[in-house]
Amino acid sequence: VKSGCPLAVKLDLVTHMESCGLRVCETSLVQWTLQLKQKKQNVPLDEVAAMVSSATGEKISSDPEAILSAARRVLKGIYAGADLGITQADFGIAESGTLVTLENEGNARLAAVLPRLHLTLLEAENVVADLTEAAAQAVRLLPHAGHEARRCLLAAPVRQRRAGRPRGRWRRGLPGQA
């Protein structure tokens, strides 16, 4: 499952994963319906209702609340059955290794905790030094990222460094690579 993730689009990650035989499911309701419609834009509500009806196996009316409720039921099952959840962090905190995702739909949280594995993408320029910079960054990002109506902060903390142990480093690549 893939939560809203512009970096994955930039990297063409979905195409690469699909070329390897993997099935990728969008989790944003808009992106999911576009995926069901084979990427065509401007899908009318009655068509969205028909697509969600087909996905759920039940008749769904074109009422937006009915569509949303049914889609959430389907997507929660997809999250729970997924092997991998892909999200994008809004910023990372170098001091602690914490990745922070600001979101308002809950998709990133579900993609992070329900699948067996979780992959978070982060743009290198979105790394801040410490919690003080992170708080300032969150204040800057929230009003511009569609988070006005319902603010939700998701932080994936990592174990803190113990006194006397050397600080960790951010590095690129996979474990075991030089």
Image (cartoon, grey):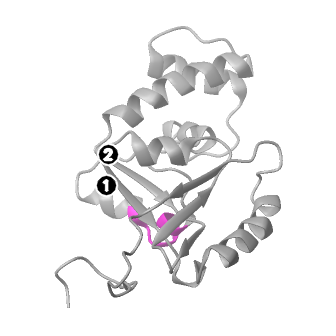
Q: Which mark is residue 159?
A: none
Reply above or below: 66 against 130: above
Q: CA distance from mark 1 to mark 2?
A: 6 Å
Contact? badges 1 and 2 (CB < 8 Å): yes
Residue 66 to residue 172: above or below: above
Q: Secondary structure at mark 2?
A: loop
Q: Please tell me the numbered disc located at residue 18.
A: 1
Q: State which region is magenta.
A: 7-13
Of the residues shown, which amino acid type is indicated by label 1? Glu
Q: At label 2, which amino acid type do we have?
A: Arg
Q: Which residue is farthest front? A: 163
Q: Position of residue 59 (x, y in %)?
A: 55, 8
Estimate how packed mark 1 is, as few (under 14), some (14 to 19) or many (20 or more) residues with alpha carbons within 10 Å.
few
Query: Could you tell me residue 174's position as x and y percent?
Result: 25, 77
Whether residue 140 is visible, yes or no, is: yes
Q: Which of the two residues, 127 or 41, is positioned nearer the viewer here?
A: 127
Depth order, front residue of 42/65: 65
SS at mark 1? helix
28 or 102, which lies in front?
102
